[in-house]
Amino acid sequence: MAEVRTEKLCKSYGIAEILKDIDLTVEDGSFVVLVGPSGCGKSTLLRTIAGLEQSTTGKIEIGGREVNDLPPAQRQIAMVFQSYALYPHMDVRGNMGFGLKFAGFPKKEIERRVQEAARILKLEALLDRKPRDLSGGQRQRVAIGRAIVREPEVFLFDEPLSNLDAALRVNTRIELAKLHRMLKATIIYVTHDQVEAMTLADKIVVMNKGRIEQAGKPMELYYHPANLFVAGFIGSPAMNFVPGRIVETTEQVLTLQSDNGLRLALPRQAWGTAAISSGDQMTLGLRPEHLKVSGGTGFQSGPISLSGAVDLIERLGDIGYAHIRLGDGSGAPLVAEIRSALPLEINDTASVTTDLEHLHLFDSEGRAFAKLAAKAAA
Ligand code: ADP
Ligand code: MG
């Protein structure tokens, strides 16, 4: 297997810059997941690494070798797409071996590799079947098998599970995790599914408008998002944002006047000596699952205390979400996770607090202030 590296990689179509200065390192044998909104350039990045698209400027290395000028076939990669496009008239064996046959591999070697891939993917009993006699999950495994038989240095996956129904996606995801452990393969994987990203990745790369916003271990991005974009993208339901302005600072307290008219006393100590002054525009970030909710006002003691009227309650089973109107009611309601058993109804007043280490604060450019409490805990 091999490491993949890009350096200042740029890709334009005409005057449209699609990828901008992408510096990416995918360590040998690691599973890297690319996430980001639709159209941010994930597929373009994969296709450029694969050689299906020519980069405009910058460098791509696979296994320490610069591959910018190599055709796809010589880059030692195999790609699996969302639409697996199997040949309908060929059986599973034929579909998996076709690429090798086309490349002129000897029959015996093709059979060996197909058998091996079929064993890994539990397709042995299905080798003589045609695609129409397979389930969606089995077809997707054949598509993965087609990649495995090529024994590539690097696997590229572009949303491979998004055509499968929910239950099958879960199964196939678990199989993919096992497959990665077994093959010790270098994998770059695109998905829009949070759970896939969090569970499969050694490293998640969050992209936005052709740039990398942040790259890191899943839990690192979750606990220490570098900016508003990543904070809002990782985590579900999304982090709540309370925008406002600092109106007073003392050694103990930062007072945030929110745009919807709340006056919040934030513990200064959470951000150490970070330069925060009166007048600064700030956004407070609070994850729904880190909020503690009770009925009535003022029951909670904690580093912050918010209260408002309940707009909506969604009970999903054991847990649920309360949507709470804050301040003058302008701006998005605060979404807070609750136990479904909590006796709370629409129009009730709820009060909310959280722990010190779960407060996020972002400056006017959207950059996160590092948290002392969280650092100490990490
Ligand atoms: P993603 O996979 O993150 O959804 P893509 O990489 O497919 O995004 O696309 C990124 C941007 O590049 C989109 O705005 C898309 O319209 C544009 N794009 C993709 N392929 C082409 C092409 N062949 N010509 C022009 N623009 C393209
Ligand atoms: Mg795409």
Image (tube, rainbow, N blue to C red):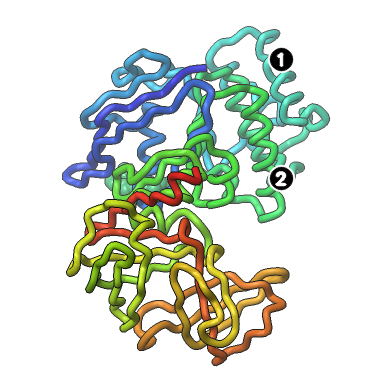
Q: Position of residue 372 (x, y in %)?
A: 39, 49
Q: Residue at x 48, y 50 (%)?
A: 222
Q: Residues within 10 Å of mark 2 (few under 14, many from 20)?
A: few
Which label's residue is closer to the chain start, 1 or 2?
A: 1
79 or 360, nearer to the observer: 360
Question: Is the shortest distance between ligand 2 and the CB of mark 1 under 8 Å?
Answer: no
Left or right of 123 in this view: 182: left
Residue 89 visible in image: no
Residue position for label 1: 111
**Residue 171: mark in rendering:** 2
Q: Is residue 231 above or below residue 349?
A: above
Q: Position of residue 37 (x, y in %)?
A: 40, 54
Q: Residue at x 58, y 39 (%)?
A: 200
Give the label, 1 or 2, closer to the camera. 2
Q: Residue at x 27, y 24 (%)?
A: 59
Q: Residue at x 35, y 84 (%)?
A: 330
- Direction right: furthest residue: 125
